[in-house]
Amino acid sequence: MQITYIHHSCFSVESEDTVLLFDYFKGTLPQFDSKKHLFVFASHKHQDHFDPVIFDLVKTYPRITFLLSDDIRMDEDYMNRKQIPEAARHHMIQIGKNETLTLPVNSKNTSMNDLGTSTEKTLSLKVETLASTDEGVAFIITANNMITGSNKVIYHAGDLNWWSWDGETQDEYTEMTNNFQREMAKIKNREFDIAFVPLDPRQEDRFWWGFDYFMKTARTKLVFPMHFWKDYSIITKLKNMERTREYFDRVVDIKEEGQIFNV
């Protein structure tokens, strides 16, 4: 897989048959193979995770599916005002919290009909969601090759994080903590090949809480920090902490936008 850090919480994950694009709203996109099936994920409506500009991708990538959290308003009036291409409207799926769906992959070796489905279902994506502790959902994507039987499991948190702040009330702390830990309990000991997890310096001395809790709950081979507002130093700060010793070598060092990782 080739992973590209684009901006903020946006990454692309490119494999032989698919491209997964998460939470794009700005930044320079790689040139993907237009014969691959592009899945565009938007975890929620916040402007640092979603922009209608993503729908213009349908002009370049005909094998495309948009998976949008259902908190993103996509009624006809909205789509008309935002001048969303008609072609894109036929390739949208909205998904809520704690849902599961399975989608066929239209690889470059298969044909695609008007509904974006294929008769040769040798590849599929299973998409699961968790409830965010802010808006929208977190995504769990299982890429399944039905011929080889191999799976790759990818986690993108969106804004699912332990959002604890200095100055919050005890009630706010308790509600946030309970909500976050409830969602983490759903993935206890689950194995992920790749994970994208918030590491937000605005939380000051609590910046590591959610990241550390995730890493000590799930079993993750490689984790990419995100949502760090271009403060790359926060990654080094995390990896230098004594409490992260057991997993610091699985935390990816991101240095700049456009950085490519082959994993």
Image (tube, rainbow, N blue to C red):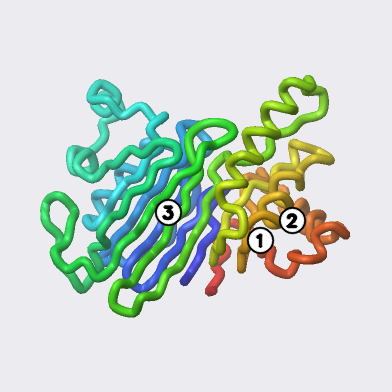
Tell me which amino acid carries mark 2: Ile
Q: Relative to 94, is 231 on the left or the right?
A: right
From the image, tell me which residue sits under label 3: 21
Which secondary structure lies at badge 1? Answer: loop
- Name the residue at 35% across, 45% down: 67
Tell me which amino acid carries mark 3: Leu
Q: Earlier in the sequence, mark 3 or mark 2?
A: 3
> Would you say the residues marked 2 and 1 are in contact, meaning their CB atoms lie under 8 Å apart?
yes
Residue 214 horizontal/vertical position (percent): 66, 51
Determine crowd level at label 3: few under 14, some 14-19, many 20+ residues with C-alpha closer than 10 A: many
Residue 160 horizontal/vertical position (percent): 58, 40
- Name the residue at 36% across, 75% down: 149
- Please state, as top left, top right, bottom left or bottom right, where the C terminus lies in the image: bottom right
From the image, tell me which residue sits under label 1: 254
Separation of marks 3 and 2 at Cα, in angstroms:
22 Å
**Looking at the image, residue 251 lies above or below residue 238:** below
In this rendered view, identify the residue nearer to me: 155 or 31: 155
Tell me which amino acid carries mark 1: Ile
Q: Relative to 33, is 226 on the left or the right?
A: right
Q: Earlier in the sequence, mark 1 or mark 3?
A: 3
Q: Earlier in the sequence, mark 2 or mark 1?
A: 2
Q: Relative to 61, is 250 on the left or the right?
A: right
From the image, tell me which residue sits under label 2: 235
Q: Quadrant of residue 112?
A: bottom left
